[in-house]
Image (cartoon, rainbow, N blue to C red):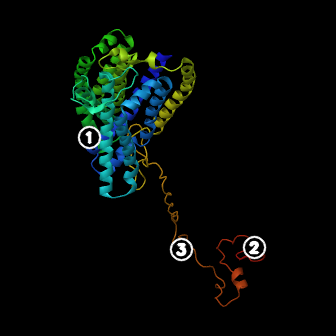
Amino acid sequence: MEMLWFGIAAVMVAVYVVMDGFDFGAGALHLLVARTDRERRQVLAAIGPYWDGNEVWLLAAGGALFVAFPRVLAAGLSGFYFAIFLVLWCLILRGMSIEFRSHLAHGLWRTFWDAVFAGASALLAVFFGAALGNLLRGLPLDAAGWFSLALFTDLSARPPVGILDWYTVLVGVYALLALAAHGAAYLAWKTDGPVQERSRALRGRLAPAVVAMWPALTAATLAVDPALFANFAGRPLAWLAALVALAGAGTLLAGGLRRADRTAFLGSCAFLAGLLGATAASVFPVMLRAVGDPALSLTVRDAGNDPQGLRAALGWWLVGFPLAVLYFVMLFRLHRGTAVAPREGEGYSGGGRGPPGGRGRVPAPALSRPAPASPPPERPPGRPRGARPATGWRRPPGPRRPRSGTSSRARRRWTPAARPPRRGGTRRAGSPGRWRGR
């Protein structure tokens, strides 16, 4: 059961990185791909339906650790106390910038929140990358399974270690580049116009850099933890995940060259998922590696919960996980096509969608204000009021229309002979050309 829940937690983390990663990448590139206010609203409209739902996978990963490996979660929250506060503040500021940006139509207000959105997204990518680097390098665990870390010491990967050193900073920068390329691939797929062209250009620069840095990061990891690659060599699942990452990298590069935007984005997803899968398969069964003394490391067997509780939690997970996947499939299906910048005053998600080809976009109906009233129907073409018909009609002989001084009864009884009868009128006997009203 512990092995199964280790795989579930790894899947949750990988899904979170893939799904929320394009949000982070789009936010980090927000000021580069979008120059005008309309273009920036288009970027927000592209991630608007997904960004808050994507963060649910982070909560799901934390819930999986809480259910299956509570000792790991407790030690991690305690040791990374300061770093977790920084992550929470960045998540809060990022959500505030998305929600508050369009509340005021003022240049300074929107510029400030645009800068907050870009900075918080970039810092989150670096923080999560540095956290992964700390797990791979090792932590100063004691005999009870607890640890504490300073922000930095001498920037070396040898004890005493801090949160930041040359290896964790390298992993954080690589995570920023990888997620920026992921976000550029997403924006190239979901936008059009100048934003799409700039996203394609950045994807063409970032994707080769990420693929080229992959071997360098692998060599740095080998220098920090040589035992990791000894595990990798004997595990077929790790080889399969590495092949998925390699195929994803090739698909990302080939899709960018052919301007196949959706294919390039799917390749980026496969690359990130395969990279994380190979890493998880290589570190198993260690969850928190102890630097200096490997015997103090926390493994799935040491930190696992009661098997009966794990079986009960697995039943609930088998119900909730397919529902979450179905929700995101429907969400992407519902918002397929290119994103359209919403009209002024409608927020970041008031835009419509277009067909999958990106042509003929139809704006969605405005939900924040009533639809404008339809114009009155035009008068059908015909002869002007008061003009004679073109059939040569002439006034028939007989008495003229009574003047205004006559009685109302006489006016009701009199009509021209060729005039159609009034509604409900009756024909007077002996007068074939006259009609009498009620």
Q: Nearer the viewer, residue 45 or 435?
A: 45
Q: Quick one: label 3 or label 2, which is nearer the N terminus?
A: 3
Q: Which residue is mark 3?
A: 385
Q: Nearer the viewer, residue 129 or 420?
A: 129
Relative to 297, 411 lies left or right: right
Residue at 45%, 29% (x, y): give it: 61
Q: Nearer the viewer, mark 2 or mark 1?
A: 1
Contact (CB < 8 A) between labels 3 and 1?
no
| Circle 3 crowding by C-alpha within 10 Å: few under 14, some 14–19, many from 20 | few
Q: Which mark is residue 378?
A: none
Q: Could you give the CA–CA distance between mark 3 and mark 1, rounded to whole angstroms?
A: 60 Å
Q: Could you give the CA–CA distance between mark 3 and mark 2, rounded to whole angstroms?
A: 27 Å
SS type, badge 3: loop
Amino acid identity at mark 3: Arg
Give the quadrant of residue 165.
top left
Q: Quick one: label 2 or label 1, which is nearer the N terminus?
A: 1
